[in-house]
Amino acid sequence: MAVTIPPQKYLVEAIGGSHVAVTVLVPPTAEPETYEPTPRQMTALAQSQIFLRIGVPIERAWIPRFESANPKLVIIDTTRGIEKMPMIRHVHEHAHASPNRQEAQQAGLDPHVWLSPVLVRILAMNTRDALIAADPQHAADYRQGYARLARTIDRVDGQILSLLAERPLKQTAFIVFHPAFGYFAAAYGLQQVPIEMEGKEPGPKQLAELIDFAKSRGIRVVFIEPQFAQKAAQTIAQAIGGAVVTIDPLQEDWPAGMEAIATALAKVLHQ
């Protein structure tokens, strides 16, 4: 079985246990938007029976090649049943109402659904059903694995709520380089303000807007993912007399990754 990103591996193994062997397409340190599979990965995919897609950009470019290399490959969309939100495009958009359908199509839909516990439960259900369809002999094991995972998801959600509710938040907006945290923000009443705009670093005007926004809100931290360069983030952090802090949306250990993100945000938003 093959998946696109490391958090999916956690979900599959949590549900499938010893019945599954998982190949991950994108390594933890790589950008899912630009990564190119190695020949060894293409060989592994040619031997896989199932590919669980999650909707990140690399899939649009590479799935046709996977199908060509392995005509018997069954491709399952694990985001079935999830209504995706549009990507935030600029510093002011977070303060506006939800964009209309035309604006959403222009901005593109946000693929980072695994950063919301509610949506992860849907991903997990679809993963469970895919495993049962492929291996009905072990259906009971997959249902039990899903039940255990659902309890873990509930626990993670509760821990994040507790972290953010320890005391009143002094700030709900946070600046991040890549707009990966829209679903996390929506789940917990926060607002992400991205530096990167439609896959590009900001120009001088956009940088000035971000710096003014940060100063007006008293924001002193810029969050960045380890998969991206830090130049623009460092520029803004220096201009506001702040710091750059790393948070990772692609950590394979999904519970630990979610709690690490929440801990980093809570520390800043409570200040």
Image: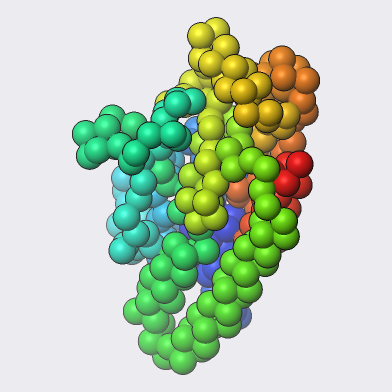
Horizontal and vertical percent position of residue 86:
36, 40
Q: Is residue 137 left or right of residue 158?
A: left
Q: Residue at x 57, y 62 (%)?
A: 9
**What quarter of the picture does the C terminus occupy?**
top right
Q: Is residue 123 above or below residue 87?
A: below
Horizontal and vertical percent position of residue 133:
34, 79
Q: How is the image coloured?
A: rainbow
Q: Is residue 80 above or below residue 20?
A: above
Q: Residue furthest left?
A: 102
Horizontal and vertical percent position of residue 87:
40, 37
Judging depth in this view, the residue of 152 and 74 nearest the camera is 152
Q: Is residue 15 left or right of residue 88?
A: right
Judging depth in this view, the residue of 207 and 15 nearest the camera is 207
Residue 175 visible in the snapshot: yes
Judging depth in this view, the residue of 173 and 197 nearest the camera is 173
Q: Is residue 72 above or below residue 40?
A: below
Horizontal and vertical percent position of residue 139:
43, 88
Judging depth in this view, the residue of 173 and 90 nearest the camera is 173
Q: Residue at x 31, y 45 (%)?
A: 64
Q: Is residue 99 left or right of residue 268?
A: left
Corner quadrant of residue 62:
top left
Q: Is residue 213 above or below residue 260?
A: above
Please tell me how many numbered marks the rendered image carries. Answer: 0
Q: Residue furthest top?
A: 204
Q: Residue at x 31, y 63 (%)?
A: 81
Q: Residue at x 34, y 59 (%)?
A: 82
Residue 42 visible in the snapshot: no
